[in-house]
């Protein structure tokens, strides 16, 4: 009798541990549908605000793609500043980039460590290439000729991040 009771208890525990809660699956399905709607609504809102975007579905995932502008900061023709002028220019350059980030125009900014002509990048979140170009040209390093810019449209899934 005790062996039979233990057997039934173990069998019950196995059954309970293998049982899935259907309400969780329904809630997850509902959230996925809401995410899809949200991505489509967000794309529509971005387009109404003048940004280029679209959604696409791959399997169970809906991606919201947005066009950004990758600005390559390249070595310019005027690179002979003295150390004091260069330090001041660097401070102004950093203030400009910080402002672009704080105001939501630039999403990703950083230098390259190698000795190539490309000194850094900034990814701009603007409506047009012309707007990204104009903002990048406000950089004091660009104005001084120490850097030049090259702007390219770039698509990525909105919300992607570096890990």
Image (spheres, rainbow, N blue to C red):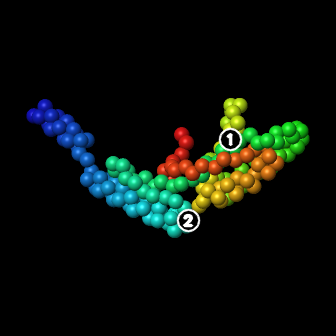
Residue at figure coordinates x 82%, y 39% from the top left: 79
Q: Report the disc number at residue 120.
A: 1
The percent coordinates of residue 2 (x first, y second) are 13, 33
The image shows residue 13 at horizontal and vertical percentages of 22, 40
Quadrant of the drawing holding the N terminus: top left
Judge by depth and name the residue closer to the eye, 66 or 144: 144
Asked if residue 44 lies left or right of residue 133, the reply is left
Query: Which residue is most to the bottom?
Result: 48
Assess disc 2: are there few (<14), some (14-19) or many (≥20) residues with their C-alpha within 10 Å of its C-alpha.
few
Give the mark nearer the N terminus: 1 vs 2. Answer: 2
Image point (25%, 47%), residue name: 20
How far from the left and from the top, in percent, is residue 86? 85, 41
Disc 1 residue crowd, few under 14, some 14–19, many 20+, Cα 10 Å: some
Residue 105 in view of the camera: no
Residue 57, placed above or below residue 74 = below
Q: Residue at x 55, y 42 (%)?
A: 162
> Could you say which disc has been placed on residue 50 in the image?
2
Q: Is residue 54 left or right of residue 80?
A: left
């Amino acid at each position: 009798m005790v062996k039979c009771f233990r057997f039934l208890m173990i069998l019950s525990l196995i059954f309970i541990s293998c049982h899935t809660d259907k309400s969780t699956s329904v809630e997850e399905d509902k959230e996925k549908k809401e995410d899809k709607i949200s991505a489509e609504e967000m794309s529509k809102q971005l387009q109404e605000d003048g940004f280029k975007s679209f959604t696409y579905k791959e399997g169970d995932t809906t991606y919201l793609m947005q066009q950004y502008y990758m600005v390559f900061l390249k070595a310019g023709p005027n690179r002979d500043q003295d150390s004091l002028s260069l330090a001041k220019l660097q401070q102004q350059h950093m203030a400009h980039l910080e402002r672009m980030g704080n105001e939501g125009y630039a999403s990703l900014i950083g230098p390259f460590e190698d000795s190539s002509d490309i000194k850094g990048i900034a990814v701009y979140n603007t409506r047009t290439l012309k707007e990204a170009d104009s903002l990048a040209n406000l950089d004091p390093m660009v104005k001084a000729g120490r850097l030049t810019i090259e702007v390219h449209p770039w698509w990525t899934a909105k919300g992607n991040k570096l890990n």
